[in-house]
Amino acid sequence: MKVSVVVPVYNKGPFLKESFDSIFAQTHGELEVIAIDDRSTDDSMDQLRAMTDPRLRIEQMDRNMGHPMATQRGFDVATGTYIVRADADDIHLPHRIAEQVAYMEAHPEVGVSSSWLKTFGSEDVTWEMPETDPDCRAELLFGMPVLDPASIIRTSVLRANDIRYHEEWPRVGSDRLFFAQFLPHTHYGNLQKVLVNYRLGAQNSNHGDSMLKRREEVMRHVFRIIGLPLTEDQFTCHLMLMRAFRTPPTAADIRRLRKWVDELIALNATHHLFPQEQFRQRTHKAWDKLFHFLPAHGLAPAMEHIRQSDRRSAAHMSYLAKYTMGRWLGRTGA
């Protein structure tokens, strides 16, 4: 079964050989590997032209348009039954594509899926993803339902529903918008294992960007795509729930945010966007995780979070006491 591997390339010269070797070594043999050079200014294009694997096809953008539109160029020319996304500086386990194709064949209702990632370089952690479609859907307003650099897409679903990247989208974070488009058309899923080693460092496209600015721009698009209009106050609250603060949070902000948690769950019940129970759990998880980011902004918002929580956690009180003591003693963290 033919698989198209789409690899956008921009100034990834130091990593290209190792990354493409891991693609050419895949145990799934029927591949076309589409490298899209986004007008690199290093020797990336020369390196691509020097590769001799006959499965490699090289495209070059007319001008630099960023990772999303280079990816779209690859999607437009792909001919495989499935499209696999690969970044040009990552390492792909030899059985990655074979296992992902087997998963998609066993789950014809799934239009897009991915696996876990293990990072290397500036960090060494494993990014785990939810397994089932309901849990993936519940993730859409808080994170990613699938991971772009480890994703596989059923090409027929992509074409039938005109799912694509758009030039007006922000370059960083557009993968969240791209995968949100699958919501009304198909199921999501994720293999519960690491199949990609993801390189973290200064070469990443989102390195150094402002988290607040990025999340604000992307999330405005997300809410438009899913058709859920928010007031500006509701949108500000949702940014806080995602740990993106426009201003240092106060106790009053936390009270407003707790109201938004209930409103958001009620809105979902009305609009039937996400599975209700999974979405309720995911929303409360975001609320609970927020607590650990509040002591840095003072005692009052953290204490208000504890007061507004359904369950009063001794662990939260202990954490707050340790953090406060650490600040008194001149430590940056506790």
Image: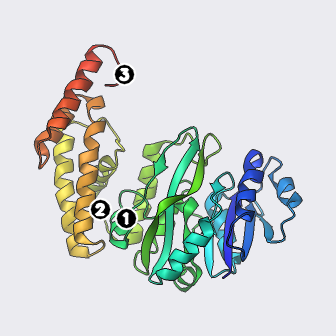
> Is 36 or 247 nearer to us in this picture?
36
Query: Along the horizontal axis of the image, is 38 left or right of 105?
Result: right
Amino acid at the residue labelled 2: Leu
Q: State the CA–CA distance, disc 3 to disc 1.
A: 36 Å
> Is 250 or 22 nearer to us in this picture?
22
* Classed neighbour count for the residue bearing mark 3: other residues with Cα under 10 Å, few (<14), some (14–19), many (≥20): few
Q: Position of residue 144 (x, y in %)?
A: 43, 60
Q: Position of residue 26 (x, y in %)?
A: 69, 66
Element carrying mark 1: helix
Q: For marks 3 and 1, give the one nearer the viewer.
A: 3
* Residue drawn at (74%, 58%) of the image: 20
* Residue drawn at (38%, 63%) of the image: 140
Q: State the CA–CA distance, disc 2 to disc 3.
A: 36 Å
Please identify the quadrant where the C terminus is shown: top left
Q: For marks 2 and 1, give the one nearer the viewer.
A: 1
Question: Dot 3 corresponds to which residue?
Answer: 332
Q: Earlier in the sequence, mark 3 or mark 1?
A: 1
Question: Dot 2 corresponds to which residue?
Answer: 230
Question: Dot 1 corresponds to which residue?
Answer: 223
- The single residue placed furthest to the top in the displayed view is 329
Quadrant for residue 277, please give it. bottom left
Query: Along the horizontal axis of the image, is 244 left or right of 198?
Result: left
Please identify the quadrant where the N terminus is shown: bottom right
Q: State whether residue 241 is above or below residue 166.
A: above
* Residue drawn at (45%, 54%) of the image: 217
